[in-house]
Image (cartoon, coloured by chain):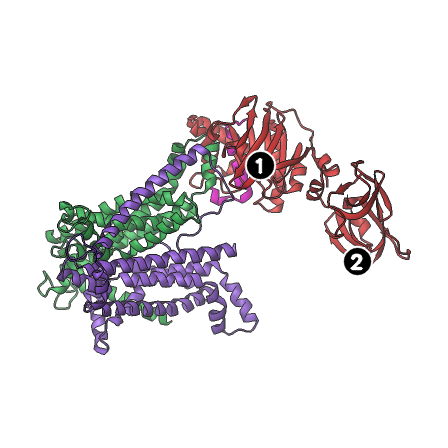
Chain colours: A green, B red, C purple
Amino acid sequence: MPFLGYVGVFLLLPTGIVIWDAVRNPAGQFDLSSLKLLFNPDVRSFFTGSIELSAVSSVTGAILGALLAYAVASGNPDGVVRRLYLAGSGVLAQFGGVTLAFAFNAAIGPSTGFLFHADWYYNFPGGIGLIYIYFQIPLMVLVFLPAIDGLKIQWREATENLGGSTWQYWRHVGFPLLAPAFIGATLLLFANALSAYATIQAWENQIAYTVPQQIYISINSEVGLASNEGDVLALGMVVFVAIIMVGYALLQRRAARWLR
Amino acid sequence: MTSSAAETYAPPARAGVEVRLEGLRRAYGQVVALDGVDLTLQPGELVALLGPSGCGKTTTLRLLAGLEDADGGTITVAGRDISKLPASKRDMGMVFQAYSLFPHMTVRQNVAFGLRLRRVSKEARDRRALEMLELVGLSEQADRYASQISGGQQQRVALARALAIEPKVLLLDEPLSALDAKVRGQLRDQIRRIQLELGITTLFVTHDQEEALAIADRVGVMREGRIEQLAPPTEVYSRPASSFVAEFVGLTNRLPGEVRNGRVSVQGCELPLMDSTVPDGPAIALVRPEAVTLASGAGQESGPLVGTVIAATFLGATSRLTVDLGSTTVMAQLPTSDAAALTAGSQVTLTIRPDPVLVSADKVAASES
Amino acid sequence: MAAITSLGESAPAPQTARPRGMQIGRRRRLNLFRYVTFTIFGLFFFLPLFAMVRFSLEGKQAGTFSLSAWTQIGSTPGLVSAIEITLELAVITCAVVLVLLVPTMIWIRLRVQWISRIFEFLCLLPLTIPAIVLVVGLQPIYNKIEHYNVSALQLFWVYVILALPYAYRSLSAGLTAIDVTTLSEAARSLGASWATVILRVIVPNMWQAILNAMLLTSALVLGEFTIAEILNDVNLQVALFNISRATANAGVLFSTSTAALLFAFALLLILSYVGRRRRRGRA
């Protein structure tokens, strides 16, 4: 099938190439030594930076996004508000990147800020964290909303009927049921933040804080730490993200069973 | 079509409570769902609310449960006005139509949930949960999850869960509608048995008239937010209070006739009227199919009661035949053995049993309904 | 940035309720919560965008109004061509995605159902592989391509891959909603050829899933930056980025960004209305 051929060339092959190169030395022989690079303290700082930024933005985004999702879900299913927020979320989640960085530069940049001048804007993870949160929340709304929709009214009413208060409902029924979906969604947000490149580049590309940024630098410089540094870092990222996505998939399955 | 009002049973173990609904009113924006509903349930009684969708039966139930607030009227349980009480404090057990079991809990945990909310100790609640599961015959499924048991079993668990908290009133919102026909019948009887055994006052909502007639002490037929008739099943069936009730419950023939002196003349037969004050003139008589008997009419001269069978439906013990009389068509219901010889196309003569009939409010404008 | 939208179709309609009420007290508390939440979040989201719009309307001296940022869109070197390229890329990518996915998915559903798991895995795989990683491995491949044709439009090859997860989910939801097997069997029994079945029977019934898939793909292409930049091609986002490196806060940056955002927002909003109407008609 032509489809397979296509996907093969453009997806599997590049991935394969990355892994391949990561485990080769300049002489072209199979050599795992470059993998040691991953333990190099400099490199580790990139990973730490990435993880820090991603963790902060994904957890905050998840909690705030869940609240917003609940607000949207509990309203009129056909209403204007719901449509607005969903369309908006769709746009903001996809459009992050460069556009968003500009907007934030305009809004709160230390020199040009229209709203106010935040001196912490160029701090890491402060300013960029805020931008990340800005697009993580819509993403959370999009991913988590179906789960909230999946909470059947009957469960709430049955709990009330059996004598439960609102708090008891959430404690015994609501939260437990939403937990897998919530954690799964947070993982997704985390993976998303890890992979993000455009936004942070547009925010500040002189200093590399995260792995994606470093990959970019090492690709473009002729003098890298090792010629395949980019590949190694990429491999590290793939493994990391893959693990997270597996976790996400498993949780999704559980959530789907209950809430569909 | 039989109805069982009271079955022979041991007297109830506990006396139920009286439930009184007075003047209940509820509207959603422009739509009036309840337009002044008055209903009193005697202790230990099972009342079935029957009616087409949108008639207000479910709304009545939900108001009683406290899941919604009434715009007007009062609700009294055991002499106490609970109109302002929130649902969680009303001490009622409710069985929903579907989807009400918590998917992340086992059957046992589901049933014990109400007790858990009341801080009953684990052993006590498990014991009670098992007791309830035995009552509905599902103690073997105690450790399964809702998704692993059938629809009928789920509803039985829902029933067990509702009863576990020893509620004063039991509410059932079309509990059988989502089930297969066969399961429906079995579960229906089981619910009635348990209800009688426990003597608990029960409100049962359904749109299936066969269900209502089979299970209830009294049936409340509702239409557009009001109760049209509240009476034991036999009475609702054979002495309907209005043409709506007559046509909603059971099948009806609408036959044009002439009213004179408190009797109506249909196809040459004189039938007494339920309401003798109906003024003279043309009218539509509502005749039950089982009041029409057929006999082979081969060779009969044509007359008002001679016709041809145009359709025959086999229903098991009885059969329903549609007869064309020329001026109108009539449905007759007879034991299959009698109907066997009267195949489609054969000529038959009719007799209409002189039971008192209702006359429809609509005038004779169009003869076909 | 390959952000992840969970659903092809915008959130499935939640369980429709007959007019079902709630207790008054609870409803009031809920509404209070909703209003507060919407206001806070609304502000939060709105402010940076507002700043951007405001900036785009700024004149030479701070505080004056001017539409120059907007008119400059046409006259800034490279920007117009970048916009053109990006739009063309969007169209090409959409077309390729549809041609690639629709027949394959239908075929799988009808004939080779056992592959569907693997297929789904493949389609969702791009989500797992960050763009930045992908592009590293892509370079040698693109080098070869560039031998034949040096053009930013070649980006479409990889954009199709990026769009796979979203398009797949959308089309999959659309296919599930209609009973493909029955429809195609009915059509075949009436004598239709396979092409007819696909084009005239199935596709018309899933046009809103297709529309959705196209919109998501387009949004993706419009917002894509990473791969384009690293491969040294100039698409819309890259152009904007380059401009920002040259003049930190050129007005044209903001006007273009605002335009792009509003454009995508309008599209998605319209889609949600079109979708609902169809669904209500069907139900």
**Horizontal and vertical percent for residue B118?**
44, 26
Chain letter of disc 1 in the image: B
> Which amino acid, mark 1?
Leu
Name the side, left or right, on which C270 lies relative to B175: left
Q: Residue at x 73, y 35 (%)?
A: B234
Visible residue check, residue A60: yes
Query: To which quarter of the image does residue B206 belong?
Result: top right
Query: To which quarter of the image does residue C216 belong?
Result: bottom left
| On screen, residue B31 above or below A98 | above
Mark 1 and mark 2: span between their CA atoms? Answer: 46 Å
Name the side, left or right, on which B214 lies relative to A147: right
| On screen, residue A157 above or below C272 | above
Q: Residue at x 79, y 40 (%)?
A: B357
Tag 1 secondary structure: strand
Question: Is the N terminus of chain C in the top left, top right, bottom left or bottom right quadrant?
Answer: bottom left
Task: State the residue position of label 2.
Answer: B344
**Horizontal and vertical percent for residue C235?**
23, 66
Task: State the residue position of label 1.
Answer: B34
The answer to which of marks 1 and 2 sits earlier in the sequence is 1
**Crowding at mark 2 (Cα within 10 Å: few <14, some 14-19, many 20+):** some
